[in-house]
Amino acid sequence: MFKIGQETRALLDDIEKRIDPAAEDDFRQQWQEFLDGKFEGEIFTPCRRTVSESAVLCRDININDAIGNYELMLASQMEGISRALAGRNRVLDVRTNYGTGILTSLFGAEIFTMPYEMNTLPTTYSLHDTDRIRALLEKGVPDLNGGFGRQVFEMGEIYAEVFSDYPKISRYVNVYHPDTQGPLDICELLWGGEMFYAMYDEPELVHGLLRLVTDTYTAFLRKWFALFPDRGGLNSHWGTLMHKGQIVLRDDSAMNLSPALYDEFARPYDAELLQKFGGGVVHFCGRGDHYIESLCKIPGLTGINMSQPQYNKMEVIYQNTVDRGIPLLSFSREQAEADLTRPGGFHGFMNC
C-alpha cells in the first residue's frame, strides 16, 4: 500500500469533489465529434461547461524533486489536474514524467539531470561511440526495468493504486503513455549526430539500431498498456489534445532528413508502431513540409501535432492534413487565424 501524505491526500480529495461527471462527459463528447469529422466550425477549441476553483493551495514542486520522489511526482501531476478543472480547455491527464531519456536510459545511456534552478526534465547523454552501438545490437532488447524503466512502471502502479480509491479521478483522469519518443529520435538521442553520417556510410547498422529500438519501444509500451489499457479508442496527451489510436510518436529528428532518407529510415518504423498500437498521432518540431506527404499516407495516422509553423510552407502542410481529413492538433492559434482565409478553410479539422 502506497502511503500518501496529508497535503497530497487533501489535493486528491479536492479534485475528486470538483470533477463534474456531466461536464467531463460533455467535454469528451466535444472531442469525439471533432475527431469523427462532425465539427462544423473552422477552429475547434473544446470548452468545459463548468469550472471550479481549488480549495487547496497548490505547492510549487520542482521537477528534480518529483523525479526522485513518487509522492511528489503524483502531487505535481495532480496539481496540473487541479488547474485544468479551474479552466475551460485543458484535458484531464497525467503521466510518469521522466523526460525524453526513458528509452535511451534502458540501453545504458547516462542520465543527465538539469540544474535545479532550471526546473526542467532530465535527458541522457549520447554515446557517440559506434562500437558501443554494435555491442547493443548483439545484446538485443534491454531490461525494461533498467534506467528510468523501473521508476516509470512503479509510478504507473502507484497511479493505478491511488486512483482506485477515487471513482471520478479513475474514470476521468487519463494516465497517458510516458515519453517514449519515436524510433528515429531515440536512435539519434542514443547514438548522437554520428547516426546521420552512418545513414550513408553504414545504412545496415542504422537499420539494425532502428529495428532494436522499435522492438524495445513495442515491448515497453505493451507492458505499459497492460497497466493502462486503451480507453475506448480515444486517448490524450500533454493536457492539450485528445486523439484516436493509442500512441503519440515524436519525429523531431526527421527534420534533418531528405524525403528519400525519411522514407528509408523513419517512415517504415513509425508505420509499424502505428499498426501495432491501433494508430495514433505523429508530433514534430521544426520543419516537416518536405516529408509531410509521405507521413500523411501512413495507415493508422490519426492526427498531426506540430510546432513552429513559421519554419514550414503551411499550404503544403494544410494540403496534406486538413484537406485530407487529418486533423492538426493543438496547433498555433495565431497561425490558424492568420490562415483562415485560405481556399476551403480547414474543413473542421483544426484544433487550437
Image (tube, grey):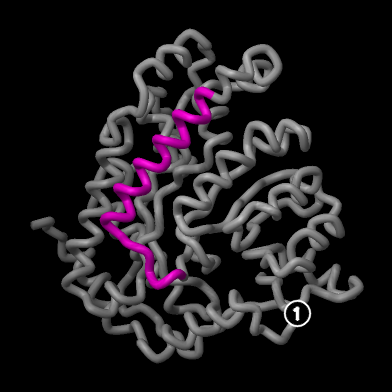
Q: Which residue is more in the foreground, 76 or 337?
A: 337
Q: Residue at x 43, y 30 (%)?
A: 104
Q: Position of residue 181 (x, y in %)?
A: 51, 42
- Residue 217 falls within the magenta-colored stretch: yes
Instruction: Tell me which segment is drawn in magenta.
Output: 208-233
Q: Is residue 271 above or below residue 74?
A: above
Q: Is residue 40 left or right of residue 137?
A: right
Residue ID for mark 1: 42
**Pointer 1 local density, CA inside 10 Å: few below 14, some 14–19, many at least 20:** some
Q: Residue at x 52, y 68 (%)?
A: 242
Q: Residue at x 42, y 35 (%)?
A: 215
Say which element carries label 1: loop
Q: Is residue 29 above or below residue 304?
A: below
- Could you tell me the amino acid type at mark 1? Glu
Q: Is residue 283 above or below residue 265?
A: below
Q: Position of residue 318 (x, y in %)?
A: 80, 62
Q: Position of residue 234 (x, y in %)?
A: 46, 70
Q: Which residue is more in the foreground, 122 or 8?
A: 122
- Residue 268 falls within the magenta-colored stretch: no
Quarter of the image for the N terminus: give it.
bottom left
Q: Is residue 258 left or right of residue 158?
A: right
Magenta: predominant secondary structure element?
A: helix
Q: Which residue is more in the foreground, 3 or 297?
A: 297
Q: Residue at x 72, y 78 (%)?
A: 348
Q: Position of residue 139 (x, y in %)?
A: 35, 18
Q: Is residue 227 left or right of residue 245?
A: left
Q: Is residue 72 above or below residue 201?
A: below
Quarter-of-image position of residue 217:
top left
